[in-house]
């Protein structure tokens, strides 16, 4: 089927087998993998999975690795043999990993040796996870078992039935992949409660990538996609990985966020997908250079903007054609600064449940501040608009997920009459350009584009019975883009008594509450931790249903 990752990989190997698919740095040297080599590695990895007992269309397999060629090979080995993948952030804490593995009912996990301590902590409570596949066991013996689960050292085991992997009787060749097969289950905070697994098909991703590419009319097979954002994130997965695979272009992996500037000069990328925070840093460096670099100051004095553009472009590798940003709003002044010096910045909009790209700006004629028109092949609508035309943005089309895993009520709430309800408030102008006006849902989106759902943090804090009222909400800090996580806590003062039986001073209670919040949040990823904690001693306002009136407190933690 054309709308599958399997078709994209096979087509790339057939048409561009000798072209470079992946580049990465190892020991200071650039290493490369061609499309033929990538397909061969995928076939061998798929065979290893089969020998280890992972069946086609089995229960899902989790993938928890940093960006790397191993991530790509493992993902394709699973997806191209019709095995659903649960991509996971390798920085998640034990409680978060345990929740996702349990909820998704995964039968195995692909990770690396660095995560052995985490696995030892979570596997005793996960009876369905029977096999662990470990990368990067070099220099140390991989354990035969972890918590009585079979452990497979991937690099050392790839020669098992290696010849069979490349024949018609191998797992890869013997498997047919359909467009509606589940490709991934991606966990997203959604609109209520704990993170939910959005079920996305091969067709969802491939059609979404094609629509985004058609909107931009930008990409070609000579492009070099610098991969900075994590591939477990739906935006990076589709915009970097799937589009590059579609065009048989090149993926280039940076070593770390700290080496982006150096890596760009080595790789000379043409396309960069970024969150606004990264674009802001680029713009700030340009601004600093324009104020402090004597050569650039001289060029400005003589109005030599062309030379300034050349030097700035050279500092970014010399070939960048466009920067595409998503996940959170990008400041308009940052976009203007980058464009002024010859680097178009394009904003897009999406959500995991839509694979994820919904709209993208015209990179040649953008309307800065909008998120562009909808990509081809989908329908959008503003539901129940008010007098200003503001209403909920809803979406219909082949990019929309099947639903949430094992959550029929949540699926029914999100998918109504064929339309995906985004929870985002928006307007659409006469040219079809969408502007996001706010959110119906309480989801917090930080400046890095990461989603934090307040109820997940609240549930974590509720474990301390001394905390009577707990409200977690996003707040704005001055002119900073995105939101930060804040918390308003009302302690049960009766639980804070001294040896004499009297309630302790409020200052002591406040200090202990703050310490408790920090301790309790140790089970959550760092970006979910409250940055501002306000301790109050009056009960929080509640609705008639006795729920905390969240809307009443919105904005109260904002800093001017």
Image: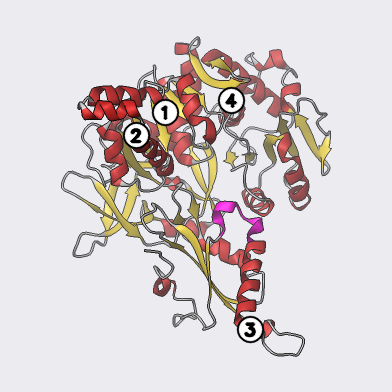
Give the CA distance from mark 3 to mark 4: 57 Å
Ranked by sequence position, the earlier of labels 4 and 2 is 4
Q: In this view, does 475 lie to the left or right of 171?
A: left
Looking at the rendered image, the quarter that the C terminus falls into is bottom left
Give the CA distance from mark 3 to mark 1: 60 Å
Based on the displayed image, in which of its 4 quarters is residue 115 positioned?
A: top right
Rendering coords of residue 239 (x, y %): 42, 33
For the view shown, which residue lies furthest in the left direction? 430
Rendering coords of residue 308 (x, y %): 29, 26
Instruction: Select label 3 or label 1 by which is in front.
Output: 3
**Secondary structure beneath label 1:** helix
Q: Is residue 214 above or below residue 503?
A: above
Q: Residue 472 carries which label?
A: none
Q: Is residue 95 left or right of residue 232?
A: right
Q: Which of 200 and 277 is in front in this view?
A: 277
Instruction: Select label 3 or label 4 by which is in front.
Output: 3
The answer to whether residue 134 is visible is yes
Q: Residue 212 carries which label?
A: 2
Magenta stretch in the rendered image: 521-529
Give the CA distance from mark 1 to mark 2: 9 Å
At 31% from the left and 22% from the top, the residue drawn is: 310
* Number of residue marks: 4
Q: Mark 1 points at which residue?
A: 243
Ranked by sequence position, the earlier of labels 1 and 2 is 2
Q: Name the residue under label 4.
A: 69
Instruction: Select label 4 or label 2 by which is in front.
Output: 4
Give the CA distance from mark 4 to mark 2: 24 Å
Q: Which mark is residue 505?
A: 3
Instruction: Select label 1 or label 4 by which is in front.
Output: 4
Ranked by sequence position, the earlier of labels 3 and 4 is 4
């Amino acid at each position: 089927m054309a709308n599958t990752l399997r078709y994209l990989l096979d087509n790339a190997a057939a048409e561009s087998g000798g072209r470079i698919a992946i580049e990465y740095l190892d020991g200071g040297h650039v290493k490369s993998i061609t499309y033929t080599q990538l397909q061969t590695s995928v076939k061998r990895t798929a065979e290893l999975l089969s020998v280890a007992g992972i069946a086609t269309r089995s229960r899902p397999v989790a993938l928890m690795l940093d960006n790397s060629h191993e991530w790509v090979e493992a993902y394709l080995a699973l997806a191209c043999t019709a095995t659903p993948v649960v991509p996971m952030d390798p920085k998640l804490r034990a409680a978060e990993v345990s929740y996702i593995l349990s909820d998704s009912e995964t039968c195995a996990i692909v990770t690396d040796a660095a995560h052995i301590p985490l696995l030892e902590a979570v596997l005793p409570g996960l009876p369905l996870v029977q096999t662990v596949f470990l990368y990067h066991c070099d220099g140390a013996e991989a354990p035969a078992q972890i918590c009585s689960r079979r452990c497979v050292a991937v690099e050392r085991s790839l020669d098992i039935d290696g010849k069979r992997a490349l024949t018609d009787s191998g797992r890869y060749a013997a498997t047919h992949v359909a467009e509606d097969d589940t490709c991934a289950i991606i966990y997203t905070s959604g609109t209520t409660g704990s993170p939910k697994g959005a079920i996305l098909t091969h067709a969802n991703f491939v059609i979404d990538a094609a629509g985004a590419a058609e909107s931009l009319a930008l990409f070609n097979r000579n492009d070099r996609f610098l991969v900075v954002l994590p591939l477990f994130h739906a935006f990076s997965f589709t915009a970097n990985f799937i589009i590059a695979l579609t065009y048989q272009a090149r993926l280039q992996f940076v070593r770390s966020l700290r080496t982006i500037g150096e890596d760009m000069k080595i790789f000379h990328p043409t396309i960069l997908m970024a969150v606004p925070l990264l674009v802001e840093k680029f713009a700030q460096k340009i601004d600093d250079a324009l104020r402090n670099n004597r050569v650039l100051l001289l060029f400005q004095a003589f109005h030599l903007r062309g030379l300034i553009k050349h030097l700035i472009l050279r500092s970014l590798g010399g070939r960048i054609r466009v920067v595409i940003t998503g996940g959170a709003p990008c400041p308009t002044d940052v976009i203007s600064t980058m464009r002024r010096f010859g680097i178009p910045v394009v904003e897009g909009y999406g959500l995991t449940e839509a694979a994820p790209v919904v709209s993208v700006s015209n990179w040649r004629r953008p309307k800065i501040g909008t998120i562009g028109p909808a990509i081809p092949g989908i329908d959008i609508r503003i539901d129940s608009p008010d007098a200003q035309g503001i209403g909920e943005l809803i979406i219909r089309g082949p990019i929309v997920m099947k639903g949430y895993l094992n959550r029929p009520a949540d699926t029914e709430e999100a998918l109504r009459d064929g339309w995906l309800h985004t929870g985002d408030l928006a307007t659409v102008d006469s040219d079809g350009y969408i502007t996001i006006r706010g959110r119906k849902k309480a989801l917090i989106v930080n400046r890095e584009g990461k989603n934090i759902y307040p109820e997940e943090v609240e549930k974590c804090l509720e474990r301390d019975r001394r905390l009577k009222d707990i409200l977690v909400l996003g707040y704005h800090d001055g002119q900073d883009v995105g939101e930060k996580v804040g918390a308003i806590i009302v302690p049960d003062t009766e639980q804070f008594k001294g040896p004499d039986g009297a309630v302790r001073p409020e200052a002591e209670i406040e200090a202990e509450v703050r310490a408790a919040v920090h301790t309790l949040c140790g089970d959550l990823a760092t970006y979910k931790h409250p940055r501002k904690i306000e301790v109050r001693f009056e009960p929080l306002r509640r609705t008639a249903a006795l729920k905390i009136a969240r809307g009443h407190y919105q904005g109260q933690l904002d800093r001017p």
